């Protein structure tokens, strides 16, 4: 398991089974029982926190990472590895997460 991997997961309830993107930083993944993931959807809504990833990571349809829909989930709920996003796309995802969580306001001007 790696940061940037896309997995199928059962998120229960209305959400059900869907692809998610692993966001947890790489150097702690082997020590944790849970990981932070972002939902992936085929229904883009035009939010500034969405990242269009098309059919990257072997997704069957054009898709979007939703930086506003983050979950911390047990690793054992991850069912199937689909693929991985490239470093350039992960940089875009990281920037959108900063925006979604308003973290840019905590970064001092440089």
Image: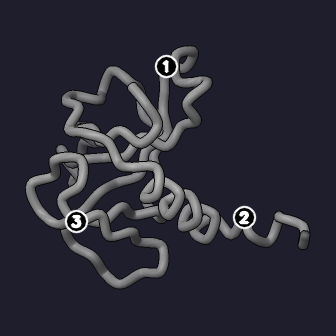
Kindly report which numbered mark, 3 or 1, lies closer to the viewer in this rendering: 3
Q: Which residue is mark 2?
A: 103
The residue lying furthest to the left in this view is 60
Of the image marks 3 and 1, the number of the one nearer the N terminus: 1
Kindly report which numbered mark, 1 or 2, lies closer to the viewer in this rendering: 2
C-alpha separation, residue under disc 2 versus residue under disc 3 = 26 Å
Foreground pick, 11 / 105: 105
Image coords of residue 5 (percent x, y): 35, 38
Horizontal placement of 108 versus 58: left or right? Answer: right
User: Residue at the spot x=20%, y=38% of the render?
Assistant: 82
Image coords of residue 39 (percent x, y): 34, 54
User: Residue at the spot x=56%, y=57% of the render?
Assistant: 94
Image coords of residue 32 (percent x, y): 55, 20
> Which of the image's four quarters has the C terminus?
bottom right
Above or below, 51 against 84 in this view is below
Foreground pick, 105 / 82: 82
Above or below, 60 against 74 in this view is below
User: Residue at the spot x=21%, y=54% of the render?
Assistant: 14
C-alpha separation, residue under disc 3 versus residue under disc 1 = 30 Å
Dot 1: few (<14), some (14–19), or many (≥20) neighbours within 10 Å? few
Quarter of image, res 42: bottom left
The residue lying furthest to the top in this view is 31
Q: Which residue is mark 1?
A: 33
Numbered circle sitting on residue 57: none
Dot 2: few (<14), some (14–19), or many (≥20) neighbours within 10 Å? few
Mark 2: which secondary structure? helix
Of the image marks 2 and 3, the number of the one nearer the N terminus: 3
> Which of the image's four quarters has the N terminus?
top left
Of the image marks 1 and 2, the number of the one nearer the N terminus: 1
Q: Which residue is mark 3?
A: 54
Mark 1: which secondary structure? loop
Dot 3: few (<14), some (14–19), or many (≥20) neighbours within 10 Å? some
């Amino acid at each position: 398991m790696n940061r940037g991997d896309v997995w199928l997961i059962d998120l229960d309830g209305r959400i059900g089974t869907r692809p998610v993107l692993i966001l947890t930083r790489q150097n702690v993944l082997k020590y944790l029982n849970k990981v932070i993931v972002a939902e992936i959807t085929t229904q883009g809504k035009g939010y500034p926190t969405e990242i269009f990833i098309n059919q990257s990571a072997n997704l069957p349809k054009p898709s979007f990472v939703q930086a506003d829909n983050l979950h911390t989930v047990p690793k054992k709920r991850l069912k199937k590895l689909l693929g991985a996003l490239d470093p350039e796309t992960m940089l875009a995802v990281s920037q959108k997460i900063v925006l979604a969580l308003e973290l840019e306001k905590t970064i001092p001007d440089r």
